[in-house]
Structure formats: C-alpha cells, structure tokens
C-alpha cells in the first residue's frame, strides 16, 4: 500500500470509528505517559484513531518521566498512567494504592545497545553466552529511558548481574528520554543505553550501536512479563466507574485496530514518533506488534516475572516479593 493510500485508509477508518453517535456527555480525564516511545502504542492509537472519542471520552496526555507518571496517579494529580509491571508491583510492596486495569505489552521491550566503537574495541562476539556479553558493560556509561528505577534501568541491572557486575560500582547510569539517547550515543556522551523501539532499530541502522542483550530472549525467563499496563487508583474505578469502563473499551478497540489494520496503525505511530526511515519504522512496528497481546488481560504470571525483575535488578529485597497479585489487577474492564 502506498503512503497516500495508507494515510487515506487510516483517515477513513478513524472517521468510521468517530462517526458513531454520542451516547452520553463527554467525560474528561488525564493520562500520564512515562516517555514518548513505541511501548505506548495503544495510547497513541486510541487517541489518534478515535477510540477515545467514540467512547465519549476526552483524554489529556501529559509526559511525566519514568516512575513519575505513576507517582502522579498515586498523588491524585493524574487519573491514569501507563507504567510497567515493575513499577506496579513495587508500588504495591510500598503500600501505595494502584490497580492495573489493562495490559498492552507482554515482553520487556528493551535491548542493551553498546557503542559500535566500544564493542569493536572490546571484541564483542554476538554469539557469545549472555554472561560474556554482559561483562563488556564494565566501566561504561549507560543511558536508561525515562527515569532511574524504571523498567529500562531494571533490565540494564539484570543483564549486568548476568556478567557478575555490581550495578552500584561497575558502571554509571543516567536517566534520559528516549528521544535524546541516539544523539548522546553518537556524540560519545554515553557508551551505551537500555532502550526500546524505535531507538534500538535506529542505532543499528545508523551503525552507531550494536545490540549486546535482547529483551525478548535474554534471559529466557523474561519471555512473558507485564511490561506495560494502564493503571489507576482503585478509588477511581469505584467513584468514577464509567472512566475505567471507557478506558478499557477504548484499549480493547485500539489493540484490535493494531492487529487487524497494521498498515494504518504503523502510519499513526510513525507520525506520532516522527520516524522517517521506512525500514526502521517497519522493524519497530513489528517488535511492537509481536509484544502487544491480542486481548489486554493481565495475569499473575506476568506480574510475578516483573517482581523477579525488580529483585534481580536490586530494586526490591527478595522478602518484599508479593505473596499474591490478585488484588492489584482486574480484567473487569477489558472483557
């Protein structure tokens, strides 16, 4: 499909979604976003393809870096947030009231990228065991998306420990928005990064970086993890139930749109994230589509893996692991 036809089809489908008659007065709500990245694809589609509008919902987005997005929900300054299962389970362990109502990403969605120059100097072997690849991180400077202790940082620490490194002393970490990471890598401000799509694909396409750890398979136990959820305070769904119902329905529709109309969805995401290179956009979209479950139901297994990632990263003590996940998620709104 040509770009023109894709744009036209996306517009037509969006029009079809938004053309349904209003069922009630429009409700207004807020959504905190930890960063601008493909992992939040469902929010962008729900907004730009008209799913929120079809639900008589006006959602104001605000980027609040990393775990700050969840903290904004906990404080009551935002109604909803996109966050990782790592953040959800850790907040619960700290007795903070949060509830996951939809899952939109079930792989980590992150890769460890090393400067190509440093990788060559350290004789990087892509076929080496993970432990050997992880040892290359020693003494380097890494950017992590969003904020310290968010899921990109958790993944970085977990990989480092595979190589016997100490996250507290064997490398330096700085929080950086994904949109700034590539320039920092190219200019030598950092030596590597823990990042997701489309930053990873762009680094490889530009030959500025190489992947030393792949979050879809390194390590194997990360094969299924609650990497991104829509969360809110439990009180929100009790006192303003219609908001949770509408957010849930819009999420279900946005996921269906993404799987059933991939060309149109990819066009929306390319525009939202300003991805110009067609090959980078296609690769980023494929990774995102593969990690987006066809139904946004949460499950205890994915949350338990998120808890393990917290522990492996050193963000939680083993004794703080939750004994049950039943009270921190509901699938009532995504049936």
Image (tube, helix red, strand yellow):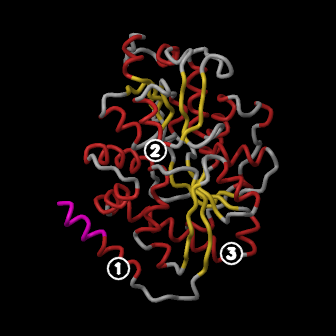
- Residue at the spot x=66%, y=47% of the render? 67
Which residue corresponds to mark 2?
Answer: 179
Q: Quadrant of the N terminus?
A: bottom left
Disc 2, SS:
helix
Q: Is residue 225 above or below residue 329?
A: above
Magenta stretch bounds: 1-10
Quadrant of residue 188 within the rendered picture: top left
Q: In which quarter of the image is residue 176?
A: top right
What is the quadrant of the C terminus in the image?
Answer: bottom right
Front in this rendered view, residue 333 or 93: 93
User: What residue is drawn where x is 59% and y is 44%?
Assistant: 302
Q: Rounded to the nearest whole Å, what is the CA distance between mark 1 and mark 3?
A: 26 Å
Q: Where is residue 6 in the image (x, y as percent from the top left)?
A: 24, 64
Q: Are there few (<14), some (14-19), or many (20+) residues within 10 Å of tag 3?
A: few
Where on the picture, by quarter, is residue 11?
A: bottom left
Question: Which residue is under mark 1?
Answer: 16
Residue 101 spot, x, y in % from top left: 63, 61
Write down the residue under mark 3. Answer: 241
Classify 5 as above or below 179.
below
Q: Estimate the spatial distance between the alpha carbons at disc 2 and disc 1, rounded to whole Å.
A: 33 Å
Magenta: main secondary structure equals: helix
Instruction: Indicate the secondary structure of the residue bearing disc 3.
Output: helix
Label 2 or label 1, whichever lies nearer to me, is 2
| Residue at 39% across, 29% down | 186
Q: Which residue lies furthest to the left in this view?
A: 2
Q: Nearer the viewer, mark 2 or mark 3?
A: 2
Indicate yes or no whether the magenta region holds residue 109: no
């Amino acid at each position: 499909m040509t770009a023109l036809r894709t744009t036209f089809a996306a517009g037509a489908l969006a029009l079809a979604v938004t053309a349904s008659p209003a069922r009630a007065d429009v409700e207004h709500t807020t959504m905190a976003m930890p960063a601008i990245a493909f992992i939040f694809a469902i929010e962008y589609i729900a907004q730009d393809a008209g799913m929120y509008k079809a639900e008589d919902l006006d959602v104001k987005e605000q980027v609040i870096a990393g775990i700050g997005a969840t903290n904004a929900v906990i404080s009551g300054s935002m109604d909803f947030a996109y966050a990782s299962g790592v953040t959800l389970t850790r907040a619960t362990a700290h007795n903070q009231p949060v509830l996951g109502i939809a899952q939109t990403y079930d792989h980590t969605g992150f890769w460890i990228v090393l400067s190509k120059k440093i990788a060559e100097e350290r004789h990087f072997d892509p076929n080496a065991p993970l432990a050997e690849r992880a040892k290359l991180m020693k003494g380097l400077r890494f950017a992590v998306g969003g904020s310290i202790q968010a899921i990109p940082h958790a993944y970085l620490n977990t990989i480092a420990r595979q190589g016997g490194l100490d996250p507290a002393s064997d490398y330096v970490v700085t929080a950086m928005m994904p949109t700034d990471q590539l320039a920092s890598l190219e200019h030598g401000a950092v030596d590597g990064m823990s990042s997701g799509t489309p930053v990873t694909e762009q680094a490889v396409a530009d030959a500025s970086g190489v992947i030393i750890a792949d979050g879809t398979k390194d390590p194997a136990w990360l094969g299924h993890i609650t990497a991104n959820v829509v969360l809110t305070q439990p009180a929100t769904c009790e006192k303003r139930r219609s908001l949770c119902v509408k957010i849930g329905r819009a999420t279900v529709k946005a996921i269906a749109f993404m799987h059933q109309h991939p060309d149109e969805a990819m066009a929306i995401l390319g525009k939202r994230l300003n991805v110009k290179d067609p090959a980078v956009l296609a690769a980023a979209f494929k990774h995102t589509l593969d990690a987006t479950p066809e139904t946004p139901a949460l499950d205890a297994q994915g949350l338990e893996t998120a808890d393990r990632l917290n522990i492996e990263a050193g963000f939680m003590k083993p004794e703080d692991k939750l004994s049950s996940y039943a009270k921190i998620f509901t699938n009532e709104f995504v049936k």
